[in-house]
Amino acid sequence: MRVALFATCLVDGLYPDVGKATIALLRRLGHEVEFPLQQTCCGQMHVNTGYPREALPLVRNYVDTFAGYEAVVVPSGSCAGAIRHQHADVAEQAGDARLAAAARDTAARTYELSEFLVDVLGVEDVGAYYPHRVTYHPTCHSLRILRVGDRPQRLLRAVRGLDLVELPDALSCCGFGGTFAIKNADVSTAMLADKMRNVLATGASVCSAGDASCLMHIGGGLARLHTGTRTVHLAEILAATEESA
Amino acid sequence: MTFLGMPAGRGQLSGERPFPAAAHDALNDAQLRRNLGAATATIRAKRAAVVGELPDWEQLRAAGAAIKDDVLAHLDRYLLEFEEQVTARRGVVHWARDADEANRIVVELVQQTRSTEVVKVKSMATQEIELNEALEAAGITATETDLAELIVQLGHDRPSHILVPAIHRNRSEIREIFLREMGDVDASLTDEPRALAEAARRHLRAKFLSAEVAISGANFAVAETGTLGVVESEGNGRMCLTLPRTLITVMGIEKLVPTWTDLEVFLQLLPRSSTGERMNPYTSMWTGATEGQNFHLVLLDNGRTATLADPRGRSALRCIRCSACLNVCPVYERTGGHAYGSVYPGPIGAVLSPQLTGVDANASLPFASTLCGACFDACPVAIDIPTMLVHLRSRVTDAKGATPERAAMRAASWTMRSPRRWTVALRALRIGRLLRGRRALPPPLSKWTAARELPEPPRQTLRDWWRSQ
């Protein structure tokens, strides 16, 4: 299968290890992975902040970049959600029916990482080893736009050495919300405080999630308070092996 | 997008301060946070239990949405049919384009009865138009008879929740309000819920027996029969609807359902979504005027036609005011309703209030959400609130025109549409490594670093690593 990685702008620029882990994981499972250098950003920040016209060229670039691939894997529920839920709509609002049709086609071949592993490749045990106590925050767009359900937890339960502890009030938003974190910083912080309290209550040494953006927010708070609890992306855990440990 | 020629909503639909400023104060109110956290968690659990036991909940939601969409698509026809039916049964129908007109009509109707006291059934529409204030200005005393609305009224306070207007108060605060404001209360009143309810019951009973005029809202109105309906938990609404000689009902024009049988859907959706009950205790229905009594109906626009004009926003008018979206909203749970400034708080308020008033008067509300989607999942008429919020954000930014934010978004778009420029920009991000451990950053980054560490840019971007392989 000709698989492309859409790393997302955040991973490309700030969290390259998440992208490297996704590539290593998919290669270990026997798939060729490409990282098309034409990729940039899905445009979600523009759309969600109220600038759909400014997102239009980014939608076009995404569609052009990934048109020829059988599958596009995204290590982000939020960006995969934007691609599926917003891209065609942005094109339609701009009156570009052809782009809307192409965007729908590309979106149908775009998968969030846990969806791709469980639904497309049909694996839950990816052969990973990660000897840590981990709690998982199921991010909002993974849950309520993509409906990934417990796929990430099923993948984590199959990881050798990993002790998965349930996160209290897991379904509650962490408070990131893109530009919400800046525009409504006080509410964002109040939500973060509750999420951190629940993460710390588990006694886990690692808080994982399928979105680097939510983890940047949760991890930024955990680090500020010197809690000693780290955030690690799902892809990095699934890529870990005895050799890399 | 502006909708010329259609009246904008007036009344209690926007706050004096933008949401973030009002939220800041609410977040620091420890008692409010405790009261809200406990109350919303309780209602959430009750709702989840009774919704979960219905195997056809998703079909009910779809039916509710479809019925309301039909009403909204043919509102002109249904309203005239409804008016005809009410008139045929000796009801008098009045049309009000906005809050001012509705208040004027109601005040005149009360003055015609020569009464200076009215009892009120809990009603969002009359809170929206600030009817109590208009009555007071005309020398008419209105008494709220819903227990929670009474608490709010006696506390010289404002409702903070659609269904549970005094959700921000706990029982010891309610006891203090009663002792201070209820002239006829026993000084040994405790904060036991039974005792508080009994005090309110005694206080209200005298009002029911003496009032000549009652004012209500309506949960539903049936176009084919001209029937109105109010659902409630206490029975105080039924007292108001039946005892006084004159009944005046103020109703938003979107409250219609086409036929009596459509109520079958909504009387399942509403109580399960709102109070978490299988059935609400009291459902009162009336058609026209009862023998010996007068019935007036005020049909209120107040921004609803303007809302209907936006194809991407109009489904907000499906709302049946259940407040399930408030109870599941992580923002509402922490700020409470007052921060939204409107009588319609929470997620539905953030999409409804700006549409009723026009987005200029409520520019911060569409941004008062993380877009987590919990509201959409809970909505019994499947209003896609997150998508609508995003749409309204674009209406706000369009209305604001050229701003520094727009310039920044344009610059980001210009950079990101070109892989070459993007590669250069990402490399430049490495300068951010110099900021390691720094917290005193200029706005807007200071909003991030106030509570969180900034991520440290890597030595090598993913694309540069890929190239180097």
Image: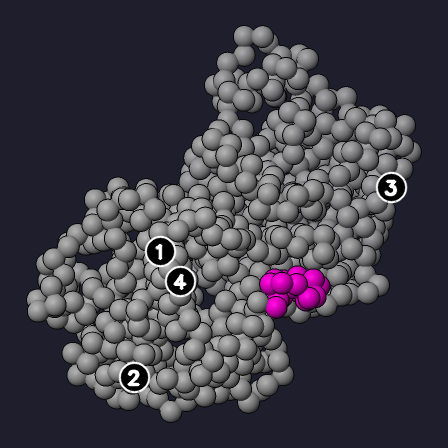
Of the image marks 2 and 4, the number of the one nearer the N terminus: 4
Residue indicated by mark 1:
B436
Query: Which residue sits at x=48%, y=42%?
Result: B333
Q: Pick the quarter of the image with the N terminus of chain B.
A: bottom right
Please name the residue that numbered disc 2 is placed on: B467
Magenta residue check for B400:
yes
Q: What's the residue at 84%, 31% (across, down)?
A: B137
Which residue is identified by label 3? B104
Callout 4: SS: helix
Which quadrant would residue A128 be assigned to in this image?
bottom left
Graded by Cα atoms within 10 Å as few (under 14), some (14 to 19) or many (20 or more), the crowding at tag 3 reads some
Residue type at tag 4:
Gly
The tag earlier along the polypeptide, 4 or 3, is 3
Q: In this view of the protein, which residue sits in the foreground, A158 or B44?
A: A158
Q: Estimate how packed mark 2 is, as few (under 14), some (14 to 19) or many (20 or more) residues with alpha carbons within 10 Å.
A: few
Q: Mark 4 sits on what residue?
A: B432
The image quadrant of residue B303 is bottom right
Instruction: Tell which subunit mark 1 falls on.
Output: B
The magenta stretch is B391-407
> Mark 3: which secondary structure?
helix
Q: Determine if the magenta segment contains residue A137.
A: no
For label 1, the SS is loop
Do the residues under discs 2 and 4 have CB atoms within 8 angstroms? no
Chain hosting mark 4: B
Select label 4 or label 3 by which is in front.
Answer: 4
Disc 4 from disc 3: Cα separation: 61 Å
x 37%, y 67%: residue: B430
Q: Nearer the viewer, residue A30 or B431?
A: B431
> Chain for mark 3?
B
Observer-nearest of A21 and A159: A21
